[in-house]
Image (spheres, helix red, strand yellow):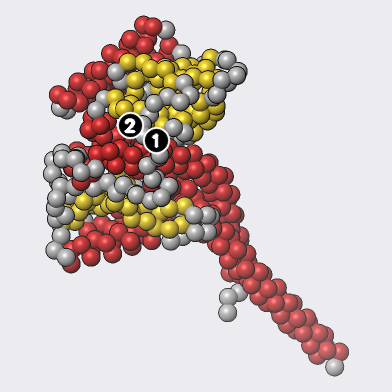
Amino acid sequence: MAELLKFELVSPEKLLMSADVQSVVIPGAEGDFGVFVNHAPVLSTMRPGIVDITTADGKNERIFVRGGFAEVNPTGLTVLAEQAVNMDEMDAAALAQHIKNAQEDVNDATSDAKKQKAQEMLDQLKQLEASL
Amino acid sequence: MANLKDLKNRITSVTSTQKITRAMQMVAAAKLRRAQESAEAARPFSERMAAVLANLSAAMEGREGASPLMAGTGKDQTHLLIVCTAERGLCGGFNSSIAKLARIKANELTAQGKDVKMICVGKKGYDALKREFSSKIIELIDLKAVKNIGFTEADDIASKILKLFDDGQFDVCTLFYSAFQNVITQIPTAQQLIPANVEKSDDAAPLDLNGAIYEYEPEEDEILADLLPRNLAIQVLRALLENGASEQGARMSAMDNATRNAGEMIDKLTLSYNRQRQAQITSELIEIISGAEALNG
């Protein structure tokens, strides 16, 4: 079997996952990218989306993240998620709640820059809803 | 000397006080476990965050246009002190030791001719500081209604701080909270938030990349602009969670002491109650006997 990638997913509230996995697909701010072992070092922001993990025994795990950072360095991959929910626990209702919150953010935004950011967030969430 | 009825009343009242303190101790012990877990669960994130930040700031080093959040405004005239305390009392010296640390710092800064502004998170710190610094406290953030402190609350506080910073309301921001060591020890701590103090300790040393160069997506400064405000929120969150655990720890040991003191007091009161009862019986007996003796005689 090929070498495994050391993967850690942390959210502010807890360490969600720390395991050796085959590969991870990160929803990067400028497009999805897959990470295997011995990937070149990258530091990227994430948009809201799904982190797709192929575990060591070939199973698939999907975790929803609401933005954050992903860092690949020679020791492995670390994902710092602003908020992370396992897709098994995630349903349309929860996503609808996220969208509602994002919509409120857009309405409450005080400056144009903030408004734009909130709007982007909202659009990405809507895209995600459509893709489910 | 108090009569028997008074003593009896006092014993009853101390007993019920003891019941209350014992219940509070148990509640604090139960809450402590949860608070401690969440404080410890938050640590990996802030550690990783610090590592990423250290990495990034090393890459940005020496470059122009570093964010003022990191480099500061170039002045240190106005200081913002964020004092995080509990919403409730009865937890020993917990609140007052944080307030004391903040007070010392504020007086020191005032003596140096600096301007001081304060934000109180938690009512107890506000109560302790309002008499002395009422003109300097610009806001009281009440977390009473919040059961479980999470990222949202910390983010709210952080965005308030950022807004003030963007408006040029202060130059340096310091956070006061109590770091949780163990149940008996909580250390009141002052931590500088802005300009960000990137620790250049050995564990945060840049990794050996074997000559590889980090790729950044998007550009470094954009990531940094995104990362720094978030780091602020994380630091606030960590402080709040540490505070939560410290509060419960302090309350638990304070209530443990109170329960023990009440126990001692009950013992003492019971002893003197019994003595007095004995004395009363004796004197009644003497009266009866001497009465009988008088009749016989």
Which is nearer the eye, A87 or B295?
A87
Q: Give SS at disc 2.
A: loop
Quarter of the image with the N terminus of chain B is bottom right
Left or right for B63, reference B277? left
Callout 2: residue from which chain?
B
Q: Position of residue A78 (x, y in %)?
A: 43, 30
Residue highlighted by disc 2: B213
Q: How many marks?
A: 2
Q: Position of residue B149 (x, y in %)?
A: 41, 38
Residue at coordinates 17% horizontally, 49% vertically from top-left? B171
Mark 1 is on which residue type? Leu
Q: Quadrant of the C terminus of chain B?
A: bottom right
Q: Is residue A39 visible?
A: yes
Please tell me which residue lies in front, A124 or A29: A29
For this rendering, which residue is in front, A99 or B46? B46
Compared across the picture, whether A66 is left or right of B17 comes to: left
Q: Name above or below for residue B149 compared with residue B128.
A: above
Q: For this rendering, which residue is in front, B172 or B91? A: B172
Name the chain under label 1: B
Circle 1 residue: B209
Residue under the image location 46 percent in, 13 percent down: A91
Residue A59 in percent (x, y) is at: 57, 15
Residue occupying image coordinates x 27% and y 46%: B196
Residue B256, horizontal then vertical, whole percent: 57, 59
Number of other residues with Cα within 10 Å of mark 1, as a class: few under 14, some 14 to 19, many 20 or more: few
Q: Is residue A64 visible?
A: no
Residue B92 tag number: none
Q: Is disc 1 placed on a helix, strand or loop? A: loop
Q: Say whether marks 1 and 2 touch (CB < 8 Å).
A: yes
Label 2, residues with CA under 10 Å away: few <14, some 14-19, many ≥20: few
Q: Quarter-wise, where is residue B270 in the image?
A: bottom right
3D distance between C-alphas at marks 1 and 2:
7 Å
